[in-house]
């Protein structure tokens, strides 16, 4: 992993991705067809990239801290932060290495942007990271650094974090936000026609905001709470905020929806910038 101050290679920069991480260890269970389309999308991500990433920085909706914090361990363990699933799902492995060098680069970029952060050499990868990455990057040979989401951060705050890390894209680092475009578990896991309709309304608004001109995108996403059914679809914002992270890192690159599905009646989307 080269230092960000090193001479840059004149090659196409990596895009930034907002990927759905599914429900717990859903891709590794006998859950007929419900998650098939999402799993297919995740398995195909590597083929859409301009080249193999040198490393990945990922923000998950499952790690919140007071200040942005990076994992600095060389071999981060896994955190099986899901409950009530079959025994075999607690034996899943994803031995991707960490990168203390990249973590330090992340800290320095945040500091240059006036964002105070922390590091954690004991923290492992939560299921918002290792479950989708087991499909997207199954060899587990690309170094991964996880970045936490600050508690109660606004969308603009999180976009600022992404903007600070945009230069990593020119160093062949892939920036990923792992969350869900719909995350109201109380209404997700049962038949609810009204919730289905509301998810479609919000998903349409969110797609239009992502695909808006880059000069307008940030202001639209910053006001996401004013969107139709926003707080019904996201009673808490932590699963949407990783999208704000990658939208900030997108710079002037256009955004597009690269995954669209209906799971248990709820509209779900994934997005790509660049």
Image (cartoon, rainbow, N blue to C red):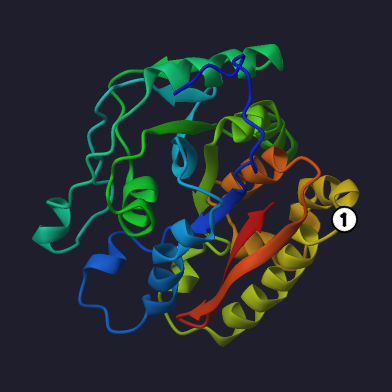
- Identify the element where label 1 is drawn: loop
**Residue at image coords 85%, 46%:** 219
The residue under label 1 is 213
Residue 42 at what x, y percent from top left?
Answer: 43, 63
In terms of image quadrants, where is residue 138?
bottom left
**Total marks drawn?**
1
From the viewer's side, name the closer residue of 171 and 263. 171
From the viewer's side, name the closer residue of 99 and 3. 3
Left or right: residue 268 versus residue 217 is: left
**Residue at image coords 58%, 56%:** 235
Residue 62 at what x, y percent from top left?
Answer: 42, 43
In terms of image quadrants, where is residue 32?
bottom left
In the image, is residue 161 above or below residue 39? above
In the image, is residue 147 above or below residue 196? above
Residue 8 at what x, y percent from top left?
Answer: 63, 25
Left or right: residue 100 versus residue 83 is: right
Furthest residue toward front: 10
Left or right: residue 35 versus residue 81 is: right
Asked whether residue 158 appears in the rendered view, the answer is yes
Residue 114 at what x, y percent from top left?
Answer: 70, 14
**Residue at image coords 54%, 36%:** 172
From the viewer's side, name the closer residue of 223 and 171. 171
């Amino acid at each position: 992993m080269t230092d960000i101050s090193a001479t840059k290679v004149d090659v196409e920069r990596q895009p930034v991705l907002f990927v759905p991480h599914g429900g717990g260890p859903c891709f590794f269970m006998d859950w007929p067809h419900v998650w098939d389309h999402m799993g297919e999308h995740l398995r195909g991500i590597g083929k859409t990239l301009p080249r193999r990433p040198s490393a990945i920085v990922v923000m998950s909706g499952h790690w919140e801290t007071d200040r942005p914090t990076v994992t600095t361990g060389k071999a981060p363990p896994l955190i099986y932060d899901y409950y009530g699933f079959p025994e075999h799902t607690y034996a899943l492995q994803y031995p991707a290495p960490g990168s203390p060098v990249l973590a330090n680069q992340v800290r320095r970029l945040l500091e240059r942007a006036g964002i105070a952060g922390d590091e954690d050499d004991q923290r492992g990868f939560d299921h918002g990271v290792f479950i989708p990455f087991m499909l997207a990057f199954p060899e587990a040979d690309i170094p991964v650094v996880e970045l936490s989401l600050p508690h109660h951060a606004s969308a603009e705050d999180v976009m600022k974090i992404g903007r600070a890390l945009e230069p990593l894209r020119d160093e062949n680092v892939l920036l990923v936000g792992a969350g869900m475009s719909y995350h109201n578990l109380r209404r997700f896991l049962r038949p609810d026609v009204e919730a289905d309709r509301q998810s479609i309304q919000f998903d349409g608004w969110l797609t239009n905001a992502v695909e808006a001109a880059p000069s307008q995108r940030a202001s639209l996403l910053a006001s996401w709470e004013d969107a139709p059914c926003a707080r019904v679809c996201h009673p808490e914002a932590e699963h949407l905020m990783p999208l704000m992270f990658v939208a900030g890192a997108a710079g002037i690159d256009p955004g597009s929806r690269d995954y669209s599905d209906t799971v248990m009646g709820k509209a779900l989307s994934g997005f790509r910038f660049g």
